[in-house]
């Protein structure tokens, strides 16, 4: 009676006439709750019947290549295709014709005057040491006979190369107006590379070669 009241363990693992299961604490739940082996597999057939949405694509316009008869054909330059009419073909072809020899060939040039505005734009003149006169008539060092009648026939302006300081100077050639970089200068005036001399309606840019850093002396 006392054993029944206090749960006395009977032979064979019975307590009060009822079998008590023994559970070991180290056994994982996956083993204890293992599903039955004869359980049917999950039905995944719905995946095969579900349509997959496709990304909408817009029709691309058809590209038609046209070749103009006036454009030069592509040439092979330095191992790359070079097209004379293309923006990317900036390199000069190997076999391109060289510029013709210049008419005025002066030994030991000191600089150049280039017409950048007015009649005769694009023309250029070699400057040597000594004095150079600018005018319209024949015999002038820089003869500007391109139709600008506002230029004096002779000695409209005068350039002198200073051998001591190796610079060009704009002198007072006569009574005609001369402008330096758009203003009336106080003559004589020392010139720098890139200065613009205006006589009449024509402007000339000085491109200097001989300077204190380099000269023929």
Image (cartoon, rainbow, N blue to C red):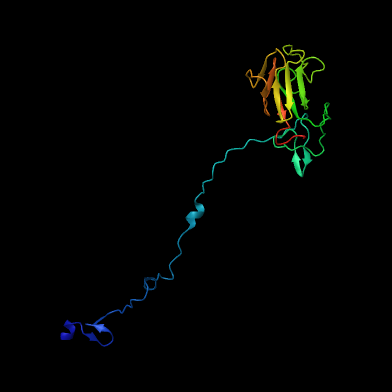
Q: Left or right? Give the position of 39 relative to 160.
A: left
Instruction: From the viewer's side, name the closer residue of 87 and 120.
Output: 120
Q: Quadrant of residue 168?
A: top right
Furthest residue to the front?
A: 164
Q: Residue at x 80, y 14 (%)?
A: 137
Which quadrant of the figure contains the C terminus? top right
Q: Looking at the picture, does residue 34 appear above or below residue 212?
A: below
Splitting the image into 4 quarters, where does residue 187 fall? top right
Query: Percent from the top left, x then y, of residue 121?
Result: 73, 21
The residue lying toward the viewer, choosing from 107 and 165, is 165
Residue at x 66% of width, y 18% of height: 179
Q: Is residue 135 above or below residue 66?
A: above
**Which one is nearer the viewer's eye here, 216 or 194?**
216
Does residue 1 appear anywhere in the picture? no
Please tell me which residue lies in front, 10 or 122: 122
Q: Please identify the residue farthest to the bottom as the structure is shown.
A: 11
Question: Residue 164, image x and y in percent?
Answer: 72, 30
Q: Is residue 20 above or below residue 109?
A: below
**Figure quadrant of residue 77:** top right
If the image is split into quadrants, where does the N terminus sit?
bottom left
Q: x%, y% of residue 116?
A: 70, 23
> In the rendered picture of this protein, how many numbered marks are placed on residues?
0
Residue 131 shows in the view: yes
């Amino acid at each position: 009676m006392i054993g029944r009241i206090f749960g006395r363990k009977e032979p064979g693992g019975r307590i009060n006439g009822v079998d008590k299961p023994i559970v070991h604490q180290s056994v994982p739940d996956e083993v204890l709750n293992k599903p039955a082996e004869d359980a049917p597999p999950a039905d995944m057939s719905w995946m095969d019947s579900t349509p997959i949405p496709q990304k909408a694509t817009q029709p691309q316009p058809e590209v038609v290549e046209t070749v103009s008869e006036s454009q030069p054909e592509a040439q092979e330059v330095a191992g790359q295709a070079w097209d004379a009419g293309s923006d990317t073909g900036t390199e000069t072809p190997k076999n391109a014709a060289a510029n013709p020899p210049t008419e005025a060939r002066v030994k030991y040039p000191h600089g150049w005057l280039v017409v950048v505005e007015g009649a005769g734009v694009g023309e250029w003149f070699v400057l040597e040491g000594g004095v150079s006169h600018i005018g319209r008539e024949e015999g002038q060092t820089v003869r500007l006979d391109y139709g600008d009648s506002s230029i004096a026939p002779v000695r409209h302006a005068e350039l002198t190369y200073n051998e001591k300081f190796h610079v060009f100077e704009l002198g007072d050639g006569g009574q005609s107006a001369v402008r330096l970089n758009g203003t009336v200068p106080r003559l004589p005036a020392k010139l720098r590379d890139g200065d613009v001399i205006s006589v009449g309606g024509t402007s000339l840019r000085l491109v200097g070669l001989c300077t204190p850093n380099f000269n023929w002396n």
